[in-house]
Amino acid sequence: MKVLSVEFLRPMLLFCSMLCIAGITAHQIIYSRAWHKPLDVVIFPINGDNSLETHNYINNLRDDSFAEIDNWLATEAKRHNLPLNRPTRTRLGKRVKSVPPVLPVDKGIVRTVLWGLQLRSWVFRNTPDDESNLRRVRVFVVYHLGEDEKPLAHSVGLQQGLIGVVHAFAKPKQNAQNNIVIAHEILHTVGASDKYNFYGGPEYPVGFANPLREPLFPQRYAEIMAGRIPTSHYQSYMARSLKSVRINYTTAQEIAWIK
């Protein structure tokens, strides 16, 4: 009888755990997209290459290093008539010493699911405070010196868990573009989808800041979930700062700014 009870309890415990995780995730999704008050965003910096230069760069980070993101989101919220004046409140958190698991290059379903489980386990073990995570986005920014013109590892944002992992350059001249990537991943956590095509260019019409512009080209702005400013159906260039980026109608709908 004892063997049977153990065999019965194991799947029940697993089911209860999954039910609990599903409930927490549903709560996070509902309340992070309610926009009744600013969404808390915490940036946890990580020295990704263990260099002294990156260490010193992180030492110079402050809350206002990310103020551009909050200001930009406030401007975009006003354009879309969101009643909330300040959609986000971004601040700098404590350093994290561990590096998150890397997204596999081969993004098969099984590998991606396993990576997602590994990431959530890593986040649980490495969040350096005990604050509630039900209504805040945790963005782990892995800083590297990197090489000019050479891209870093792919950044990700997960709506399940309100988690972002950003790979960024530890160089002041890259701060503006770092903020574009961070803003992009923050919006992923509240439901926005990527809007670039297989080749990395903006997908028409959803990846255009103004798909109704006449003439269509050149576009003046990049759409945040595409990141590039189209000059033709086949050519585009990276936005240099959030001043050249917009949230279009489709993305605003996805993040529940437009009901």
Image (cartoon, rainbow, N blue to C red):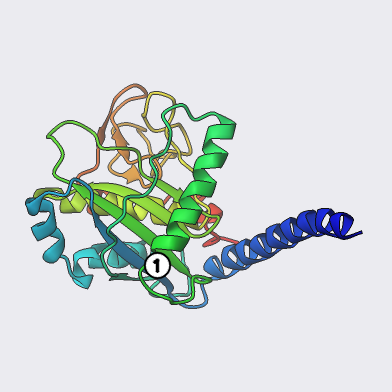
Which percent across, then down, holds residue 217?
A: 32, 31
Residue 240 shown left or right of residue 16 in the figure = left
Residue 173 shown left or right of residue 211 in the figure = left
Taking the image as drawn, is residue 104 in sight?
Answer: yes
Determine the image quadrant of residue 108. Answer: top right
Which percent across, then down, holds residue 154?
A: 35, 38
Determine the image quadrant of residue 226. Answer: top left
Q: Nearer the viewer, residue 242 or 144?
A: 144
User: Which residue is pictured at 54% across the width and 53% down the height?
Assistant: 254
Three-letter code, disc 1: Lys
Residue 204 shown left or right of residue 12 in the figure = left
Taking the image as drawn, is residue 158 in sight?
Answer: no
Q: Nearer the viewer, residue 59 or 232?
A: 59
The vertical placement of 249 against 114, above or below, is below
Q: Within 10 Å of the Cα at label 1, are there few (<14), some (14-19), or many (20+) other Cα atoms?
A: some
Quadrant of the image for the N terminus? bottom right
Residue with the mark numbered 1: 78
Which percent across, then down, holds residue 205?
A: 47, 35
Quadrant of the image for the C terminus? bottom right
Element marked by disc 1: helix
Q: Nearer the viewer, residue 24 or 219?
A: 24
Q: Nearer the viewer, residue 37 or 249?
A: 37
User: Which residue is pictured at 52% across the width and 59% down the height?
Assistant: 161
Which percent across, then down, holds residue 184?
A: 37, 50
